[in-house]
Image: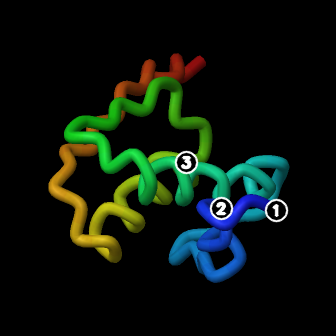
Amino acid sequence: MLPQFSRAGNFEPKLYTGGGMRFYLPLLHDIMALEKPALVVTLGLADAQAHLTFCQTAAQQNILSRCAAIRQATPAW
């Protein structure tokens, strides 16, 4: 494994609901920690784990980043 991706093993999400997204949370954490983007926009959200991973990483790593989420409302049929 490449040394720049060694942080993923230490990542503990504060919100964890299970499901298939759990495999991607360490990767999203590493991307945020390495790239340090000024703006992150999460589209779709689903259960919001990806978005909250970006927010948690920004807070823990002291990254000056704005995290925004865009979600389409589900019709109440």
Q: Secondary structure at mark 3?
A: helix
Q: Which residue is mark 2?
A: 5
- Give left or right: position of 56 versus 9: left
Determine whether 50 is above or below 39 in the image.
below
Residue 9 percent across, percent down from the top left: 71, 76
- Give left or right: position of 74 versus 59: right
- Give left or right: position of 23 versus 77: right
Quadrant containing the C terminus is top right
In this view, which residue lies farthest toward the front? 3
Tell me if label 3 and label 1 are in contact, CB under 8 Å: no
The numbered disc on residue 1 is 1
Determine whether 28 is above or below 45 in the image.
below
Residue 12 percent across, percent down from the top left: 60, 79
Tell me if label 1 and label 2 are in contact, CB under 8 Å: yes
Give the mark toward the camera: 3 or 1.
1
For the residues labelled 2 and 3, the Cα–Cα distance comes to 18 Å
Quadrant containing the N terminus is bottom right
Q: Amino acid at mark 2?
A: Phe
**Quadrant position of residue 37:** top left
Q: Amino acid at mark 3?
A: Ala
Q: Secondary structure at mark 2?
A: helix
| Residue at (60% x, 72% y) in the render | 7
Residue nearest the viewer, comparing 43 with 73: 43
For the residues labelled 1 and 2, the Cα–Cα distance comes to 7 Å
The numbered disc on residue 50 is 3
